[in-house]
Image: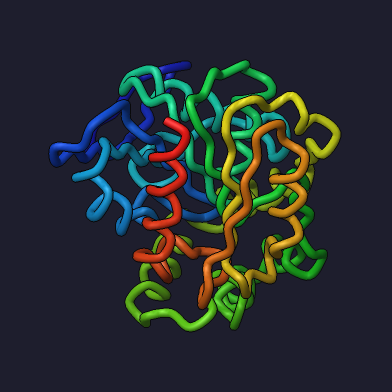
Amino acid sequence: MESVTHHGRTTAYRRANRGGAGDPVLFVHGSGGTHGLWKAQIARLAPSFPVVALDLSGHGESEDVDADAGWGALSAYADDALAVAEETGARTLVGNSLGGAVVLHLLLEREFEADAVALVGTGAKLSVMDDLLAWLDGDFDRAVEFLHEDDRLFHDPDDRYVELSREAMYEVGLRVTSRDFRSCHTFDVRDRLDEITAPTLAVVGEHDMLTPPWYHEFLAENVRDGRYAEIEGAAHLAMLETPEAFNGTLTRFLDEVR
């Protein structure tokens, strides 16, 4: 892992380049996750283009930040992503779930000039159900169990990927994971999508119940240059559950617009 220091803290990231051409692509994980949820992109896409995946503050190997859930935490996560993008020269952003909100924040609040954007299992508004918010207050085991039930994070995954996701969430822990989901719950940029000019791919697993396909249709229809893609046989973490299909979809999009 490499790291960059900014705003008094250190953000860790992994960089992979196996002869790929062009500027790096930066991958931003979702709530309770780490850069490891992009393992199939780090391993398989690096021959096509340089890949960078970070750990947001308080996740994985990155130092935490003193920020409340909501705007403060989202802004801090955007600082993390911006610092890594500037350090590595990444001009293309890929965000999953909370990571999609981070990417949208960079585009709308920091005026980040992206070459291209992929929004994966995310939305312009990310409301979280009341039961999950309650479990995140005091029953973390139930929250993790709920998220790993059918057609939430996964549809029909390899058991190894489920274990990777569970382990990451427990390692991140209740406090930070709760902050993540509560930050998602307050996020809403539905009335600002027309400000986004970068070519944008909204991609979703067909079975995703957390951020369903219509969230992504809305994204694709309301940014200025949007495209929609649906990944068969996957739910919220399509990039981990069906990496071949996801990577092919992302690569075709980037080949077209970059």
Query: What is the quadrant of the C terminus in the image?
Result: top left
Query: What is the quadrant of the N terminus in the image?
Result: top left
Above-or-below relation of 35 to 157: above
Q: Quadrant of residue 256?
A: top left
Above-or-below relation of 62 to 113: below
* Colour pattern: rainbow
Q: Is residue 57 visible?
A: no
Between 161 and 137, the one lying in front of the other is 161
In the drawing, does residue 77 fall left or right of residue 18? right
Where residue 4 sits in the image (x, y, percent)?
Answer: 32, 23
Q: Residue furthest left?
A: 19
Q: Residue furthest right?
A: 191
Q: Quadrant of residue 235?
A: bottom right
Q: Is residue 31 visible?
A: yes
Between 162 and 232, the one lying in front of the other is 232
Q: Quadrant of residue 9?
A: top left
Between 62 and 227, the one lying in front of the other is 227
- Looking at the image, which residue is at 32% across and 77% down? 160
- Looking at the image, which residue is at 62% across and 16% down? 111
Where residue 202 sits in the image (x, y, percent)?
Answer: 61, 49
Where residue 53 sits in the image (x, y, percent)?
Answer: 36, 41
Where residue 249 sits in the image (x, y, percent)?
Answer: 44, 55
- Looking at the image, which residue is at 41% across and 50% down? 34
Q: Total number of numbered labels?
A: 0
